[in-house]
Image (tube, rainbow, N blue to C red):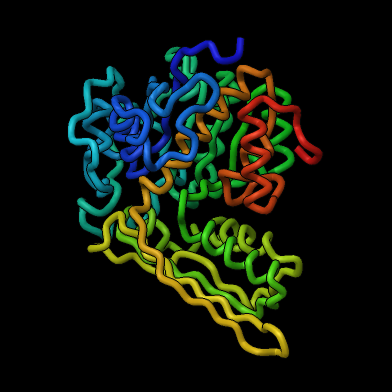
Amino acid sequence: MEHDGKPVRVAIAGIGNCASALVQGLHYYRSREGADVAGLMHPRIGSWGVADWEVVAAFDVDRRKVGRPLEEAVLAAPNCTRIFQETLPPSGVTVQMGPVLDGVAAHMTDYPEDQAFRVADADPVSVARVLRDTGAEVLLCYLPVGSERAVRHYAEACLEAGVALVNCVPVFLASDPQWAENFRRHGLPLVGDDIKSQVGATIVHRSLARLFNDRGVRLRRTYQLNTGGNTDFLNMLALERLASKRASKTRSVQSQLDTPLADREIHIGPSDHVAWQEDNKVAFIRLEGEGFGGAPVEAELRLSVQDSPNSAGVVIDALRCARLGLDRGLAGPLEAVCAYYMKSPPVQMRDTVARDRCDAFIRGAPPMAGD
């Protein structure tokens, strides 16, 4: 029955900065109501408030996290996100060893331990068995960019265990017809791919590109450059791991233009790792266009955010929407939810349209054309 009021049972793959911000948020918002729920897009989704979920399983590969209680692991190195919830109560969840596969870039060993991953000397568990045994309903995938084989391993485990998936990383599952069909055939909701932040570089860039287009200014060229000091940016120094991330961010912005730009005229992607920035992400965005009479129109901005809380503010909605999908017997990609919360959904929409359709999904309205 929909809206049974029970907490959403969540498993998390990858106990990094984003997981830390999300778990802190669970306890931060638990005692806050009314005006104190600032920072949320949907204080309630269905019968669930922002804290009506619980972590029942957690996976990682770092030796400082595997075997430790979740409430300790989310604060362990190399995590460096902002601590906004000082006290985390016992979770009853121990972080278990996941499969390494391609989840750890080789260059991590060239960097200090407090900045990089260090693989635990432990055998990986059966992810599917853990998901079944813990009664997980939704898996959040927070693996590093470029972890193609590892992400697919967790996706297969979801299919085997009967668990919905929220894919927060740019490994294309929801936007891949075969994977979409796999989840549809197994009767499981899928939300992906590659989480948008609440107010991040991609959503701002999309909005500006659409603004140029809507106001009759022809966008000629644009770039987005990003720097940060967390393990996400360190991981992406390996250029061979970046193809999917660049593709995801670039397609997301291109989708807002009636006529996409030539490859030479658009450059979007992570630019460098600056260790002292830690979880502070700084984006530099520039757009150059042609207005009335060929007059130049240029926009340039600098956006500074705490990267992981910015992501968690969206994931908190996506996991509850995935549970709604389970309760309603929906299978495959939840298109409106994907379009609103993800950079690379199966169907791209204008953000205003995606928001309206996602809100309609949450209310339980009949699907709109194209959903």
Give whichever of 199, 293 is nearer the camera: 293
Q: Residue furthest left?
A: 86
Q: Which residue is drawn at 47% across and 50% down?
A: 197
Q: Residue at x 48, y 13 (%)?
A: 5
**26 relative to 321 in the view: left or right:** left
**324 relative to 369 in the view: left or right:** left
Q: Work out which quarter of the rendered image holds the N terminus and state it.
A: top right
Figure check: 361 above or below 356: above
Q: Residue furthest front?
A: 35
Figure check: 181 above or below 56: below
Give whichever of 14, 369 is nearer the camera: 369
Q: Residue at x 59, y 81 (%)?
A: 288
* Quadrant position of residue 25: top left
Figure check: 347 above or below 86: below
Q: Where is residue 209 in the image (x, y as percent from the top left)?
A: 62, 67
Q: Which residue lies furthest to the right in this view?
A: 369
